[in-house]
Image (tube, rainbow, N blue to C red):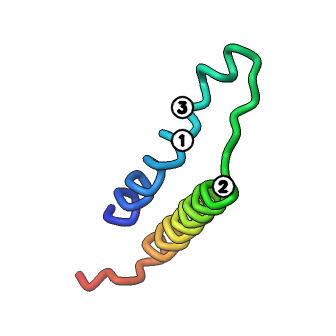
Amino acid sequence: MSLFALIGLTSIHPMHEFLSWRELLRQNLVPVVGADKIRRVQRLIHLELTGVVLILLCAALMARGVGYTG
């Protein structure tokens, strides 16, 4: 569950960045984004995807009974 919450928190910054482009896109303008900001958003999205893979791995392990002591 904490991994799910961490992914949710990690997605806040990219989502905020994408939503800030809405007004420019409505005006048919292309948002200008610096290279450092692109790298930061890419890094966060890669972290999110890694977290999703880890959640799937944990779900498969839980289905097999790994960690169950009862």
Spatial CA distance of label 1 from label 3 is 5 Å
Disc on the earlier residue, 3 or 2: 3
Query: What is the crowding at mark 1: few (fewer than 14 residues within 10 Å), some, or many (at least 20)?
Result: some
The kind of residue on which mark 2 rests is Ile
Badge 1 marks a residue whose secondary structure is helix
Badge 3 marks a residue whose secondary structure is helix
Residue at figure coordinates x 51%, y 66% from the top left: 51
Kindly identify which numbered label has been placed on residue 7.
none
Residue at figure coordinates x 40%, y 58% from the top left: 4
The quarter of the image holding the C terminus is bottom left
The quarter of the image holding the N terminus is bottom left
Residue 68, by quadrant, is bottom left
Left or right: 30 as drawn, with respect to 20: right
User: Do tag 1 and tag 3 residues touch (Cβ < 8 Å)?
Assistant: yes
Spatial CA distance of label 2 from label 1 is 10 Å
The kind of residue on which mark 3 rests is Leu
Disc on the earlier residue, 2 or 1: 1
Q: Which residue is disc 2 drawn over?
A: 38
Which of discs 3 and 2 lies nearer the camera? The answer is 2
Above or below for 50 versus 4: below
Badge 2 marks a residue whose secondary structure is helix
Percent from the top left, x then y, of residue 31?
Answer: 69, 34
Which one is in front, 65 or 18?
A: 18
The kind of residue on which mark 1 rests is Glu
Q: Which residue is disc 3 drawn over?
A: 19
Kindly identify which numbered label has been placed on residue 17.
1
Which one is in front, 38 or 65?
A: 38
